[in-house]
Amino acid sequence: MKILATYNIKGGVGKTAAAVNLSWMAASEGYPTLVWDLDPQGAASFYFRIKPKLKGGSKGLIKGKHELDVLIKGTDFENLDLLPADFSYRHLDLLLDDQKKPTRQLGKLLKPLETDYDYIILDCPPSISLVSEAVFQAADALLVPMIPTTLSLRTLQQLLRFQKQKELESLRIMPFFSMVDRRKKLHQQIVDELPKQYFNVLETEIPYSSDVEQMGLHRAPLGSYVTKSRSKIAYDSLWQEIHQRLQGF
Amino acid sequence: MPNGFVGVKPRVSGNAIFAKSQTNVTNVTCHYYLNDETDPIEALHSFRDLGQLQIGLPIMVERVFFDSFDWRLYQDGGMLVQEQEHGRTRSKWLRLTDNQLMGMLMAKVPRFPRDLPEGPMRQRLVPLLEMRALLPLVKMKSQVYRAAVLDKQLKTVLRLSVELGCVHGNGNSITGTLPPRFNLEPVKGYIKPVLKAQTVLEHVLRLEPAVPLLDEALSIIGRRAGDYTGKIKVDLSPELPAGEAVRRILLNLLETLERNLEGARADYDSEFLHDFRVAVRRTRSLFSQVKGVLPADALNRFRPGFKWLGQITGSTRDLDVYLLKLPVYREALPNSMQDDLDPLKDYLERHQKIEQRQLAKLLDSARFKHLCHDWRMFLEKDLDYLSWSDKASKPILNIANRQIWKTYKQVLREGEAINVNSAAEALHELRITCKKLRYLMEFFQTLYPEGKIRALIKALKLLQDNLGDFQDLEVQADALRGFGHQMKSDEADLPGEVFMAMGVLIDNLHQGQQAERQKFADRFASFARPKNRKLCSELFNLRGR
């Protein structure tokens, strides 16, 4: 089982779209996959048409009242399940803080699912917090969508510093460009330059497109309702790239 | 395929159990029989009160169920089905009780689980199936009418289907038609719609629960899940005349031998030949162990035939064993030397193919056919035990007791005589006596209380493992030496590295053998401990009672 997390300190960069589309790709290739919607806004749950509500809220979850397994919902897609968001996730930091070794908690909760899923994708809320730290501990790789702006570069640097500070060497950070508008000079420049400085950047870039925005109307992963779209093709190749990289470790 | 002798009851999904929680279905009735005259679409429409109903066009689904010959997936509570739908092939590993998906492959089922792509499914199936191949069991084609129940968000919360299926034989002929089935496919985390649907099924449509599809399809071709096991278990009663008891055991062994014939001839996997050989060995062991029961002329007539079977299967089995061991051999070498063994693998594979072809020819021979035929005729037709011998009419329990007790005492005698200075031959002798004892206890196990005889067999097995390893490691080291010489003379230009690696391996094997030798005293002491002695005396020693 590999645990991936779509994460960025900034919001609105395409984390949830990536989590939803990549998980769909994994499942459609035959890998049992789970998405955990950790964002209290519940966007991933919305895309899968599942109510963002957990029995017992996040308290029941963290205090170990409910096994994760009984809270999981099957999506409309074979092999693809979701652990829905809950509005109470906004207090997840406080709840974690209440536990011994708070940053180990998510990993501990996911452990029993090891034989059930090949991939678990955590869709994380923006910010850098105790929850993020727990995600970093649990995950094998962080998928970091970045809009090619100078501000994004700063946040990537922040993230890398944080990784170093917390001695999270085994965590693989895989940034990729998201919402790229090749007509913008700055986008072009950053997309061309960054991989030279930071060699872990994934080659595939997700273009800015109305297809992705329309996922909110369809409330489904792109691949389930379009066959030929630039964005779908981009997510396909992004998944192939991630999948390849994960084979190596 | 003849019907099996030992089996597992098909699991009828009749009892609905809700385990763990009310939000997840872990074991629930999902399959029902639909009346022949009910229209599928009409049946699906009965569920319109559950939510918005989305009914699709009927489609053709082709399924082939797979398992190993000895039903390892089924015994583990699963099944593997290859499905073809709209020209797309998928292989699903499903839990028997509720069809929950445990793994999926977007391709055909491979011959061996080791050929699966890396991932948890491979990780779990490789140790479960070991060397066994995945073989097609039964093929079926169905017309499937599907519907989805949607909630207010238009999310699927339950899937329904009506299936009209036929079992197909080789080629494309229809072997039999299945009764129409109504299936519920729960969506994880949505139990309420399932409960509502069950009410409709049971109280409105009044349908009866169906057995799992796999069991149903198998019954059409006259098979039963779990209908083969390599283990021997023949029901005997203490008063049964010895002739009849021996006849039953021998018939059971013949059946095992015949059931493994096709797979051994075609080399589906190495275990067919293994089980075939075990049946031969057990038969021969029984010949000599209950000598006085079978008529002398029959023994004289059939003994050479079974000896011949042991001989002709030997070299293929040996090469199979080395090929099975090869991964372990590789692992035992330093990383840098592991690839150096590749020429050995090529050599073994080449020779295994040659021996296998030769064996297949012999198994097709008139001699083999006559042997099986005549042996069966003898076992089935010649039922006048009284004319067999004096012993044949005595109660089997007496004969079994005497023979087991005698062999057991021989094991103790031989084992107790072994000390640190004893020659390897003494251990080899003991190994053979232990094997005799093991076979006897297995042949006659149903005459004794199950728990007690099992405990003894288990204790004996531990000792046998030690003795077996001790000898096998030596045999393997010798064989490797032999292969080395042969490879040198066959191919002059082989790299020297392969012989270096084989040398290291031979050393490893010798060290392993020494380690087994060290363990012997403890293992024997454990087998011969007072508790086991008492148990043996209680079960087998007539005079001791």
Image: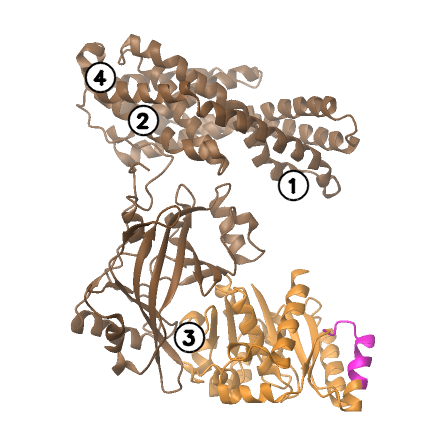
Chain colours: A orange, B brown
Instruction: Note whether residue B408 is visible.
Output: no
**Disc with the residue nearer the chain's start (4 vs 1):** 1
Please rate how many residues cluster around mark 2, counting C-alpha atoms within 10 Å: few if below 14, some from 14 to 19, many from 20. many
Measure how far apart labels 4 and 3 are at the Cα level. Answer: 66 Å
Q: Residues within 10 Å of mark 3 (few under 14, many from 20)?
A: many
In the drawing, what numbered circle is on residue B331?
1
* First along the sequence among labels 4 and 2: 4
Chain designation of label 3: A
* B162 over B362 or under it: above or below: below
The residue pinned by badge 4 equals: B382
Specify start and end residues of the magenta stretch as a single range. A189-202
Residue under label 2: B443
Residue B525: horizontal and vertical position, in percent?
45, 26
Residue type, numbered disc 1: Glu
The reply to whether callout 4 and callout 1 are in contact (CB within 8 Å) is: no
User: Marks 4 and 3: CB-CB under 8 Å?
Assistant: no
Q: Amino acid at mark 2?
A: Phe
Name the image quarter holding the N terminus of chain A.
bottom right
Cα–Cα gap, marks 4 and 1: 54 Å
The chain to which mark 1 is attached is B
Q: CA distance from mark 3 to mark 2?
A: 51 Å
Amino acid under label 4? Asp
Provide the secondary structure element on which disc 3 rests.
helix
Residue at the spot 30% in from the left edge and 37% down from the top edge = B4
Disc 3 target residue: A71
Q: Secondary structure at mark 1?
A: helix
